């Protein structure tokens, strides 16, 4: 699981800070998450292949999370993309994009499929044989979802020495990987667990930006491997966080702790702070394993 | 008259090329012309004071000329702008911007005034006591205007030696500057031209992007000081220029020559070309005084 931070600052793009956008590579998927202004340039800078992006997830329709989307869609068209593009985001996103295409009289030659979200409960919005994506309802000034990306339980691994010793024919290996007990050459039943090992633990990533402190999300993100949680403010500015429906580093850490996450990644910093380490130090008073998102930083989990 | 090129490439923003946007400083005005994605960052990089921008002119609603506008408007809001902002552009631009503000539930606290254009004839769209702005109807795939920025004729200058010799009272200086003949202390009429010099020649700048070769614009831009004319292609790709309704460097030079412009500035280059000097060389076969727009370049005329 590889996470590339294209941008991790709140509010407005600057020469040295980009608004929110991330690329999550998980099980052969390349998911784009949020798309602030300039995201297409950051994709180029970070050498993400445009053609690999087939699914874009937009948390909410504030500009620092979505103003780069129409340009990216338009660039895909100019690059003569043919593959379908799925866009998941709040109701209204389709109208926002199609109005701009209509006014430019520039329609995509590839298929653009909008999945508009309205539910206030967590729902499964994408699924294939290896990965699931669920929404994480957040509390913000407008309708906002985080996203939980989860690998499905993989196949069990053969313990080849045990398999050979038990005298199992090759034709049964597939069934073993799927967890079934099988017969050996002598016609005796072999218990699956005696000849296989558990699958790799499925990985999971939760993206939670933007949100006020919100314990309701715990149910959805419980035991997540990596939690990205916004920390727009430090605790000393908690009075700014509440009315703008953002979180402090301390609050993010509290959520990570209660969710029993493995790693907490902080981001969506207000540009008022010069030293990002303050976010880390503050969060670590509550939760130990804290990483700082930074533009262009790549995490391998 | 100072022209700052924020971006001068066609189609799609890249790490080292920006889409169209320019800042024209003329007679204490700071006019922003076109606003491709990333313009607000280029404004910062080129140290243009946001607060100075009170008028934005958008030629047409293709993304590489307008996708940065909503973000800039939104950033002005975050910076607690109070001054009115006037936006001139094709009909539809108001709906494009206001829909995005509605979906974000983020309205400006300053006054946003849209001047939507529909006329296919040149019209005066801005005027104060020193400057006029006229549209230049262009030929493109969608409704498009260039813009002609013109200083008004200034006041005549006093020839102080002659004024004193003629014995004219200070109270009459204003009338002299305005071109009137006045009486001197002895009651004799003094001819204006004997004691004043002509005003500075008013400067003018024509912005023409994007357009097919279009002689109809000559009437509007005749004798312009500086003509910015798109040259998306070189002559060898003229077959691409015609169907996409763009121009070649040669065609841009031909318009500059016929308009009797002083200087031609080329831009809106297709990113297929590595050596911009080819544009200059080609144009100079027809018109001598050619400059190349480049991102971040500043021209003082």
Image (spheres, coloured by chain):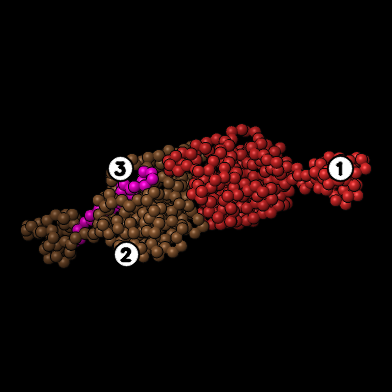
Chain colours: A red, B brown
Could you say which quadrant of the image residue B253 lies in? Answer: bottom left
Which circle's residue, 3 or 2, is located before the other in the chain? Answer: 3
The residue under the point 53% across, 54% down is A41
Residue placed under numbered mark 3 in the picture: B120
Measuring from the top left, give residue B134's x and y in whole percent: 29, 48
Q: Name the mark on residue A192.
A: 1
Q: Is residue A150 above or below residue B22?
A: above
The residue under the point 58% across, 41% down is A86
Query: Mark 3–mark 1 contact, CB under 8 Å?
Result: no
Q: Name the mark on residue B285.
A: 2
Q: Name the mark on residue A32.
A: none
Which residues are the magenta region?
A: B135-158
Q: Chain ID for label 3?
A: B
Circle 3: is it few (<14), some (14-19), or many (20+) Cα within 10 Å? some
Whether labels 2 and 1 share one chain: no
Measuring from the top left, give residue B254's x and y in whole percent: 30, 58
| Discs 3/2, front | 2
Circle 2: is it few (<14), some (14-19), or many (20+) Cα within 10 Å? few
Measuring from the top left, give residue A178's x and y in whole percent: 80, 41
- Residue B1 appears anywhere in the view: no
Question: Is residue A176 a member of the stretch shown in magenta?
Answer: no
Q: Is residue B146 left or right of residue B66?
A: left
The residue nearer to you, when weighing A139 against B145, is B145
């Amino acid at each position: 699981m590889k996470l590339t931070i294209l941008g991790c600052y709140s509010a407005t793009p600057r020469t040295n800070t980009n608004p929110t956008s991330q690329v999550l590579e998980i099980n052969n998927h390349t998911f784009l998450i949020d798309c602030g202004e300039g995201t297409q340039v950051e994709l180029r800078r970070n050498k993400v292949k445009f053609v690999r992006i087939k699914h874009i997830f937009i948390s909410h329709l504030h500009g620092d999370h979505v103003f780069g989307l129409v340009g990216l869609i338009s660039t895909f068209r100019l690059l003569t993309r043919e593959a379908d593009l799925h866009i998941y985001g709040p109701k209204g996103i389709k109208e926002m994009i199609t109005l701009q295409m209509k006014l430019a009289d520039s329609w995509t030659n590839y298929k653009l499929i909008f999945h508009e979200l309205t539910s206030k409960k967590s729902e499964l919005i994408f699924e294939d044989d290896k990965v699931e994506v669920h929404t994480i309802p957040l509390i913000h000034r407008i309708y906002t979802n985080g996203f939980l990306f989860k690998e499905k339980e993989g196949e069990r691994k053969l313990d080849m020495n045990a398999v050979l010793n038990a005298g199992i024919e090759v034709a049964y290996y597939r069934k073993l990987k799927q967890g079934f007990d099988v017969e050996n050459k002598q016609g005796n039943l072999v218990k699956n667990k005696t000849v296989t090992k558990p699958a790799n633990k499925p990985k999971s990533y939760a993206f939670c930006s933007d949100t006020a402190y919100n314990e309701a999300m715990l149910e959805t993100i419980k035991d997540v491997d990596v939690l990205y949680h916004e920390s727009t403010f430090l605790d000393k500015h908690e009075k700014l966080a509440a009315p703008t429906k953002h979180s402090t580093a301390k609050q993010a850490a509290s959520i990570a702790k209660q969710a029993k996450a493995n790693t907490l990644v902080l981001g969506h910093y207000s540009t008022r702070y010069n030293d990002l380490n303050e976010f880390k130090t503050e969060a670590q008073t509550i939760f130990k394993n804290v990483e700082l998102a930074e533009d262009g930083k790549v995490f391998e989990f």
